[in-house]
Amino acid sequence: MILQALHRHYLHLLEHDTEGVATFGYSQEKVSYAIVLNAVGTVVAVDDIRDTSAKKPRPRLLEVPQPVKRTAGIKPNILWDKTSYVLGVSTSSNRAKLEHAAFKALHEDMLDGTEDPGLLALLRFLQWWTPERFVPPMFTDEVLDTNLVFRLDGERRYLHQREAARQVRAGLLAEAGDDGKHATCLVTGVWQPVARLHPPIKGVSGAQSSGAAIVSFNLDAFTSYGKEQGDNAPVSKGAAFGYTTALNHLLRPGEHNHQRVLIGDTSVVFWAETSAGEPAPEAELLLDLLLDPPPDEAQETQRVREVLEDVRQGRPLIGREPGLAPDTRMFVLGLAPNASRLSVRFWHVDTLEALTRRLAQHTDDLRLEPVPWRTAPGVRRLVLATVPHRDGTKPKMDDAFDNLVGELLRAILTGSRYPRSLLANTIMRIRADGHVSGLRVAICKAILIREQRLGSPSHSAVKCGSKHTSDEEIPVSLDTQSTQPGYLLGRLFALLEHIQRSALGKQVNATIRDRYYGAASATPASIFPVLLRNTQNHLAKLRKERTGLAVTLEQQLGAIIDGLPEHFPRSLRIEDQGRFAIGYYHQTQALYTKHSATDSADDETQPEGADA
């Protein structure tokens, strides 16, 4: 299914003459210089064809005959190669003379009998050239070890682009395919020559720079019924070239590529097809914005908000923008590196309407009041919320659990339950660093509310009489009527911290959150009695200095305690620890809002729970 969809996408790219997409037998490679020959094979000039748009010149991508796979052997490319093969000179290869001899022998055999002026000029050049001719001013040290192509003087096209050269290339491809190994291609369903090895896939973060394989059989253990390598899963040479070319195009680098998102070690690529089989770049751009919204671009952020609001209100996408059709098919593929191979983290195909509806549901599941962000968080920010927060440094994606990315994206795109590891990791990080951010609390709320809606293993615990799990709805904002112990304990902990701050003011070096949050959220019975005794001392101090505030706080304290069971729970399940964090956030925000509205003289700063 994946290879078929990629091959179909390749055919669509060819139909629309997409830049950078090569035909079968060719590929986009980095080339720096062109050797200009006259009719008798003499070098007229060496043109620098590098891209100079940036500060430093970079090789230009050209469509050239597909390179051979090199390991330890000497294998020249056709009509282009690096200087060790083309000219016999190199600073990195100690066998440049042998490589040049192989390049010369290949082309003399391949072009034997040609009458094309350009190809004849190349043959004459190879007969005339010696490495000792590599001297200034025609050749400089910058040329060494770069890739070279050839051009006939007075023409703009390169030798490999000439019709005679393409016919020679086609003949070689036909000979290579006529090796007696034919089978029904698993991608096209046609009886064709089987690809023994598939072209490499480049651009997956963390994979080998030379490329990795999504289909590979290179060990005896993979041999089945005497079949070796590509014969185990027969894919024709044309189909193998097509699907890898399409995937390399999707993985292309650049800020203008809206078909690729990198999250952790997972490279997510996606493409769209209308019902008529035409590309839909508007839908691809929209999905890019929904999966990874830019934090600083106000216009794009507003567009994401409007689309999600339209979906919530049931308005059709096609009425919003002419390029968006609800029945547009979206293909989403997640790839991760695995040595010389690629792992498929997830694969999902659906309509644009279904995906946007699920993304809108995901945003609703995260919703908290007050809203702790300016831009709805993308998958990258959610994953970063589960990694440690070290003083003075930003959280790094390298610290995230790799499998979490694929599981989270699958849950978002399919509307299924979020991974349980996401809740466990978030709770663990809150307990470890005490950073109860709005984003982390939103993750806890989203996981719990989705499990309530879809059903979860925790519900069986309710039926069996569990004391610490509840079917009570997860609130979006402060719920003073809630009787759920975990939520109430989180509210109580926030109030105790507020009382401590009110009594001690700036004299507090470390609040109870800094010291006791982890223990209070996991084993309340061991911590809360101690905290309540200390709170009486803080309240006594407030009664002397600020009687009205002390009375108000005591009333709030009593209201929360009245809703709790007679005895504090000995421990809280992981779900209730999530409710604890939600209760703490809601109560903290309510106290902060009330404090700001009354312009109290305490001069508190905004709590960590309010993310920018």
Image (spheres, rainbow, N blue to C red):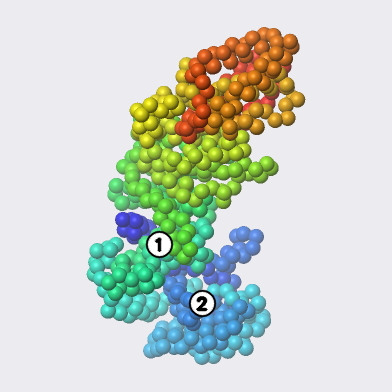
Q: Amino acid at mark 2?
A: Asp
Locate residue 11, reporting x and y percent: 34, 60
- 530 up-or-down from 253: above or below: above
Q: Which residue is mark 2?
A: 81
Quick one: SS at disc 1?
Answer: loop
The single residue placed furthest to the bottom in the displayed view is 127
Residue at (32% x, 80% y) in the render: 175
Between 333 and 425, the one nearer to me in the picture: 425
* Mark 2: few/some/many CA within 10 Å (<14, 14-19, 20+): many
Residue at (56% x, 71% y) in the render: 32
Residue at (58% x, 28% y) in the render: 526
Going by the image, does 534 lie left or right of 290?
A: right
Between 6 and 516, the one nearer to me in the picture: 516
Q: Which residue is mark 1?
A: 214
In this rendering, the label closer to the viewer, 1 or 2: 1
Residue at (48% x, 59% y) in the render: 337
Q: Earlier in the sequence, mark 1 or mark 2?
A: 2
Q: Amino acid at mark 1?
A: Ile
The answer to which image quadrant residue 177 occupies is bottom left
Going by the image, does 75 lie left or right of 555?
A: left
The answer to which image quadrant residue 505 occupies is top right
Between 28 and 434, the one nearer to me in the picture: 434
